[in-house]
Image (cartoon, rainbow, N blue to C red):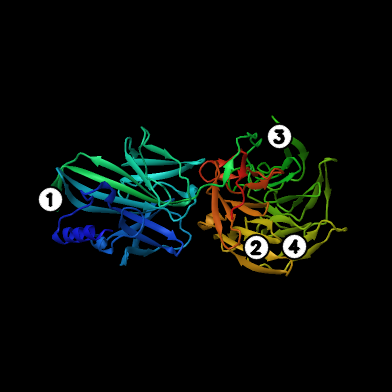
């Protein structure tokens, strides 16, 4: 801040005259900002009073020392407001944010009556941020008490939609300003009749976004009269330019919506086997699939082809290797839909020859297993995670893992060192000579973003970096590696990529149809393929999505 401006601001504050926008230039307007999850302090939120979401003169925070931030969660009981204490520390008010939260954080403040030229107005601020760059978690507060004026972002391909609402309704004609230190100039505009402003952000950065609403309402505040109310909403947004982009080539929907199935790409075809057809958490003979389906990925106008039935299985894994498909484990329901669930994990291991169109039974798993995953690394099939279901008996969370050399006859299963975890509903991927075991649910019943890595060369386990987001991002995720890149897709629709040094995950895209308990695969052209799964709000999806990857990041 220029010294003259600082002295002027301090004098005005001390004299009791409230100034929000200096008359010398509109470029020097100050606003309330909330920022979360900065690299230097990932479990901290900060409040600034500044032109953008960055520190300014600490003296300007004097009026905000009683400010509190609110984290708003939505559950079965409705919305819950969690208060976050803020303490002044240098050029920011700071508070603690527990790790793993993705809920919006807001702070509201009535600044007071401002006299500017011939206008006298009541000035209010509504600041908001999101803790992560997971755009699928950018939900509206939708609470007029805590956010009467609100900006809610939505990724639409390579564009960003900013929806502005006033008291929960679209704010048409609202002035919107977008700033970043990487932008050569501000992006300005007004919302359309639906309260939406569309823009394209060219850089990965923390963006400072604001909107204004003017209400021609006269009144009195703290003994001072005003003729209108001006409310400014700010949004500090951690935005990532996507490096995963949808391919316009249309692929046909699945014949039916399924979850917890096996899938693999073999040559120019994708194969899908088994899975759950029924309602969530309701399993029966009628709700399980026994079908093997195939789709030609490069044939124009191709449709799904049924290759016949096998055993009804859910929660299985399937991989492709040397011209064959291999399916492993899964559970079978012995009950009808009207009966009490009677679920049994299976030891089944079988291969499918597309040329002969037949299954061959192989040496079974050493123990029944379902809700696990599998991957092939250097010609060896690894099976990790899962549990054992045995009808009425309590589920047994497995703490074993197995490997089978597919290039050696006869096929045999050998144990891996005891995994340092018990998890199911996870994903397993082979990447750079290692086996990555990603997310899932722990035996305590808690979903997790935890990642464990197995090194075949040393026969040891080690910890890897967790996925970004709450534990639910790891539950029912799917992962696959291609061209030296490991990618995972999560429940919120995020596409996350392991950094080149293997120390962190980065958000690199957002799918159109968020899903979990799906399958993420890679085609022979290196495209990312998403099949099946379910959405928490809309249920099972039949949509098949195809994405291309930008060149490998440095």
Q: Residues within 10 Å of mark 3 (few under 14, many from 20)?
A: some
How many C-alpha atoms fall within 10 Å of the one at disc 4: few (<14), some, or many (≥20)? Answer: some
| Residue toward you, 524 or 316 | 524
> Which residue sits at x=65%, y=37%?
254
Q: How far is mark 4 from mark 3, CA to CA? A: 33 Å
The residue at which mark 4 appears reads as: 402
Gap in angstroms between the C-alphas marked 1 and 3: 71 Å
Image side of residue 100 versus residue 10, left or right: right
> Does residue 358 appear left or right of residue 476 in this picture?
right
Sequence-wise first label, 4 or 1? 1
Q: Are marks 4 and 3 in contact (CB under 8 Å)?
A: no
Residue sitting nearer the eye, 68 or 132: 132
Residue that numbered label 1 is attached to: 224
Q: CA distance from mark 1 to mark 2?
A: 66 Å
Do tag 4 and tag 2 residues touch (Cβ < 8 Å)? Answer: no
Where residue 296 appears, as percent x and y from the top left, is: 73, 36
Q: Which mark is residue 538?
A: none
The image shows residue 83 at horizontal and vertical percentages of 34, 60
Q: Nearer the viewer, mark 2 or mark 3?
A: 3
Q: Which residue is mark 2?
A: 397
Q: Earlier in the sequence, mark 4 or mark 3?
A: 3
Residue in the picture at 65% in, 57% down: 392
Name the residue: 60% across, 46% down: 550
Tell which residue pokes out farthest to the right in this image: 409
- Secondary structure at numbered mark 2: strand
Describe the element under mark 4 as helix, strand or loop. Answer: strand
- Residue 304's disc is 3
Residue neighbourhood size for the residue with mark 2, other residues' Cα within 10 Å, grouped as few (<14), some (14–19), many (≥20): some
């Amino acid at each position: 801040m220029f010294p003259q401006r600082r002295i002027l601001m301090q004098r005005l504050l001390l004299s009791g005259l409230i100034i929000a926008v200096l008359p010398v230039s509109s470029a020097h307007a100050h606003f309330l900002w909330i920022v979360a999850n900065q690299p230097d302090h990932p479990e901290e939120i900060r409040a600034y009073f500044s032109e953008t979401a960055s520190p300014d003169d600490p003296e300007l925070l004097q009026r905000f020392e009683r400010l509190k931030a609110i984290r708003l969660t939505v559950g079965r009981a409705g919305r819950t407001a969690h208060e976050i204490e803020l303490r002044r520390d240098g050029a920011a008010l700071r508070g603690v944010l527990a790790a793993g939260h993705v809920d919006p954080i807001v702070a509201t403040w009535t600044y007071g009556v401002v006299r500017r030229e011939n206008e006298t107005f009541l000035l209010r601020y509504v600041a908001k941020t999101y803790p992560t760059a997971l755009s699928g978690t950018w939900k509206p507060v939708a609470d007029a008490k805590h956010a009467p004026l609100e900006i809610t972002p939505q990724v639409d391909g390579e564009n960003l939609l900013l929806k502005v609402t006033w008291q929960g309704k679209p704010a048409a004609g609202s002035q919107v300003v977008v700033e970043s230190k990487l932008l050569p100039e501000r992006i300005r505009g007004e919302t359309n009749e639906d309260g939406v402003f569309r823009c394209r952000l060219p850089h990965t950065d923390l963006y400072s976004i604001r909107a204004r609403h003017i209400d021609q309402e006269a009144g009195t505040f703290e003994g001072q009269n005003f003729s209108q109310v001006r409310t400014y909403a700010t949004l500090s947004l951690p935005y990532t330019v996507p490096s995963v982009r949808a391919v316009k080539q249309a692929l046909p929907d699945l014949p039916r919506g399924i979850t917890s199935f096996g899938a693999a790409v073999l040559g120019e075809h994708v194969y899908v086997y088994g899975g759950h057809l029924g309602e969530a958490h309701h399993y029966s003979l009628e709700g399980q699939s026994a079908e093997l389906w195939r789709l030609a990925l490069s044939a124009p106008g191709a449709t799904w082809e049924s290759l016949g039935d096998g055993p009804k299985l859910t929660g299985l894994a399937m991989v492709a290797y040397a011209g064959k498909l291999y399916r492993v484990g899964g559970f079978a329901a012995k009950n009808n839909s009207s009966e009490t669930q009677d679920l049994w994990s299976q030891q089944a291991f079988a291969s499918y020859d597309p040329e002969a169109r037949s299954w061959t039974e192989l040496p079974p798993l050493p123990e029944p297993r379902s809700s696990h995953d599998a991957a092939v690394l250097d010609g060896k099939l690894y099976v990790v995670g899962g549990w054992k279901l045995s009808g009425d008996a309590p589920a047994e969370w497995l703490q074993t893992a197995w490997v089978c050399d597919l290039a050696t006859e006869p096929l045999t299963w050998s144990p891996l060192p005891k995994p340092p975890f018990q998890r199911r509903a996870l994903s397993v991927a082979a990447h750079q000579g290692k086996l990555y075991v990603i997310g899932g649910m722990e035996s305590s019943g808690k979903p997790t973003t935890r990642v464990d890595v197995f090194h075949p060369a040393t026969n040891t386990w080690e910890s890897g970096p967790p996925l970004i987001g709450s534990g639910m991002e790891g539950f029912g995720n799917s992962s696959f590696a291609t061209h030296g890149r490991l990618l995972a897709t999560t429940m919120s629709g995020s596409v996350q990529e392991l950094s080149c040094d293997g120390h962190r995950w980065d958000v690199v895209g957002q799918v159109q149809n968020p899903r979990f308990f799906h399958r993420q695969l890679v085609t022979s052209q290196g495209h990312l393929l998403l099949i099946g799964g379910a959405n928490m709000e809309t249920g099972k999806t039949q949509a098949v999505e195809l994405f291309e990857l930008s060149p490998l990041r440095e």
